[in-house]
Image (spheres, helix red, strand yellow):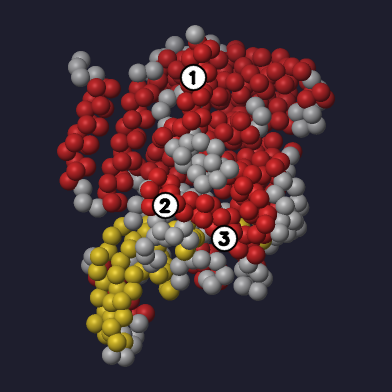
Amino acid sequence: MQLEERLQAYLKHQLPAAVDVRVANLQRIPGGASRETWSFDAAWREAGEEVQQGLILRRDPDASLLETERDVEFQVMDAVYGRVPVPRMHWIETSSEWLDRPFFIMSRIDGCETNPTRLLTDPRFFAVRAKIATQFASVLARVHAVDWRAAGLASLGVPESEAACGLTEIEKWEAVLDRDSLEPQPVLRAALRYLRHHQPPPAQRIVLVHADYRTGNFLCDPTGEIKGVLDWEMTHLGDPIEDVGWACMRPWRWLGNELIGGLMERAGFYRMYEAESGLKVDDDAVRLWELLGNVKFAAIFVTGARSFCEGRTRSPMMALLGRNIARIELEIMDLLGA
Amino acid sequence: MRPNPDEVLAGIQAALAETLVPELTTAYAQEVAGTVQMLLQSLAAEWDTAADDLRRDNQRLRDLLGQGATVLSQSDAGNENIASLVKDIESALARPPSEDLRVSALRAENEELRRFVERMAVLIEDLLADGPSKAGAEVSELRAAVYGHLRDVAARGWSFWDLAGFREYMSRLRAEQSGDAG
């Protein structure tokens, strides 16, 4: 059975009161190296009324950059719905019975742009660039304001203390390199050792960390409003400055200059985030989290390269990313002052 | 024998762009084709110089390891990690460089030498953790030399990042390198 038919069968199973369930316009969305993303239209009749819905299928790939639980992504997005702009979650399926691999389905948010090149170079968005920048900072503050205990997210794993947030992440990414490196990584290893000796300062408070918050991971409408934050696969509890550091990284300065996320000057980003969050942004803390962020980014590529080299995936993207760690190493060495 | 490998790669890129990609009807397939194009570009950029780059890198790594063995053996007597690394480096350097010029052979040698440099770079960060004055000027100089080589390698060749976040950064770096060469 084709994917469209199988999706239709799944929806019928999930919507017992619905009749004449139809799936149409199924297409795979480019981008996203850790899960497959498919857009489709669903329609059915329920209680005599025609219902139409745009939906997104997120399915585990054959091999991924990230060995993440899709359950975590689903759980967190479901928990923050209404507090942070995210799509509405519908169903999660951990069995491979329906679509060969685990997946979840969420609402599609239409009329928005997520591609950073289009967001930053399409004239439609020029007039609202300042608003997008403000939204970028304020939405991040809203993520960090989520009461993760009340939202039932302590299951993500609470760091031992505010002081332990940095070391927890350093050890996490060191373990990824231990597991997945196919070749020596002197820059990454030296950076991790440097960070062990110069850990980020204690977190001002433990928050929900998105862990991949950047231009390219939010949906923005033509008025400049962020309507959906995407890609929560790496989310965890930790230091909010981790997200600030990640957002500041050079790979996301898509225009090739120093504008953070291609949107605003660094000082402006700090100022807006501080105003919205009530937290202080310390330059040196950001440098250390930015350094770790670049190591993490490279480690993610190392994982993908291993999957490709071991034949678990034929995705050319995994090969390309594995062969493009070098520029990240340059940035790491700059941040090390080396 | 013509066409030679880089000419073949250029031809494959052209065939993809001119014939195959226009036939692709979905955004996802076009994205995959774009990725394949970038991979081909990456291969084309290193094809001609791969063996020479590895040969030079291996010689530079041997020089760095020799410098490192000298500096480290003077730095922290009693540190077992340092003693063990120095012994391993001396043993590796006692073997002459391989005369096999196949890329696979040069790469294997490069990997062995980089493994020692990885251990050395980590130890250097340990020694400098309490500040450069405590570790001594030679350790700082060794760090600068190691990262100098790693920078040269990391700045080499083609990367898709040069079209995006690293665009101006790499332009500045290339301009500096040209200035140095001039």
Q: Is A135 or A151 nearer to us in this picture?
A: A135
Q: Secondary structure at mark 2?
A: helix
The residue that disc 2 covers is A125
**Residue A185 is at least partly visible in this image:** no
Q: Is residue B158 left or right of residue A280?
A: left
Name the N-terminal-most of marks 3 and 2. Answer: 2
**Residue A131 is at least partly visible in this image:** yes
Relative to A235, residue B89 above or below: above
The quadrant of the picture occupied by the C terminus of chain A is top right
Q: Residue B179: x percent and y percent?
A: 51, 13
Estimate the spatial distance between the alpha carbons at disc 2 and disc 1, rounded to whole Å: 33 Å
Marks 3 and 2 close (CB-CB < 8 Å): no
Marker disc for residue A139: 3
**x 43%, y 74%: residue:** A90
Outermost residue toward the bottom in this view: A47
Circle 2 or circle 1, nearest the eye: 2
Estimate the spatial distance between the alpha carbons at disc 3 and disc 2, rounded to whole Å: 18 Å
Q: Is residue A251 left or right of residue A26?
A: right
Amino acid, disc 2: Phe
Q: Secondary structure at mark 3?
A: helix
Q: Is B65 or B83 nearer to us in this picture?
A: B65
Marker disc for residue B175: 1
The chain letter for the residue carrying disc 1 is B
Relative to B48, residue A194 above or below: below
Outermost residue toward the front in this view: A127
**x 28%, y 42%: residue:** B33
How packed mark 3 is, by other alpha carbons closer than 10 Å (few <14, some 14-19, many 20 or more), is many
The chain letter for the residue carrying disc 2 is A
The quadrant of the picture occupied by the N terminus of chain A is bottom left
Q: Is residue A125 left or right of residue B138?
A: left
